[in-house]
């Protein structure tokens, strides 16, 4: 039996990321992107990362499909750069 990755481990424990509704909590985004919170906020504030959705005063979530599309776009940029 293979060991679970840190993303799978978080997803199994998290009530938001693992519920199939299409949202990621902050830790889920950080785990998936491997960015620090400071980098995440800087990119978000600069308009270079999907904006979070606020649910109440202290809860923020990201739309999972938007985060995954952002990751795919970074991979595409990498491939275009490599082919030059």
Image (tube, rainbow, N blue to C red):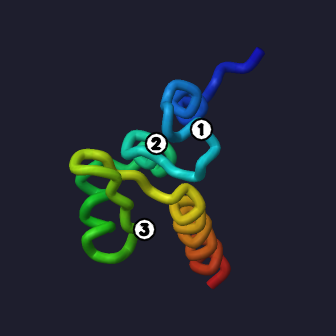
Q: Residue furthest top?
A: 1
Q: Position of residue 31 (x, y in %)?
A: 46, 41
Which of the 4 image quarters holds residue 44? Answer: bottom left
Of circles 1 and 3, the one toward us is 1
Q: Which residue is drawn at the image coordinates 50% and 32% (left, top)?
A: 15
> For mark 1, what is the residue?
19
Instruction: Using a 10 Å C-alpha cutoff, classify the residue at mark 2 as few (fewer than 14 neighbours), some (14 to 19) or many (20 or more).
Output: many
Q: Image height check: is 84 above or below 66?
A: below
Which of the 4 image quarters holds residue 49? Answer: bottom left
Q: Image height check: is 5 above or below 52?
A: above
Q: Image height check: is 57 above or below 78?
A: above
Instruction: Answer left or right for 83 relative to 55.
Output: right
Q: Which residue is drawn at the image coordinates 33% and 76% (left, top)?
A: 47
Circle nearer the N terminus (2, 1)? 1
Q: Position of residue 18 (x, y in %)?
A: 58, 36
Which of the two residues, 34 or 11, is positioned nearer the viewer here?
11
> For mark 3, what is the residue?
50
Q: Position of residue 26 (x, y in %)?
A: 37, 45
Which of the two residues, 23 or 56, is positioned nearer the viewer here?
56
Q: Residue furthest front?
A: 56
Q: Are marks 2 and 1 in contact (CB under 8 Å)?
A: no
Give the alpha-carbon distance from disc 2 to disc 1, as whole Å: 12 Å
Instruction: Answer left or right for 50 relative to 32.
Output: left
Q: Which residue is drawn at the image coordinates 53% and 40% (left, top)?
A: 17
> For mark 2, what is the residue?
28
Instruction: Answer left or right for 25 relative to 47.
Output: right
């Amino acid at each position: 039996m293979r060991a679970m990755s840190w993303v799978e481990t978080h997803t199994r424990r998290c009530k938001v990321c693992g519920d199939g509704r299409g949202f990621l909590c902050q830790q889920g985004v950080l785990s998936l992107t491997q960015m620090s919170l400071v980098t995440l906020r800087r990119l978000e504030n600069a308009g270079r990362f999907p904006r979070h959705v606020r649910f109440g005063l202290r809860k923020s979530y990201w739309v999972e499909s938007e985060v995954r599309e952002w990751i795919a776009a970074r991979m595409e940029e990498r491939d275009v750069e490599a082919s030059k």
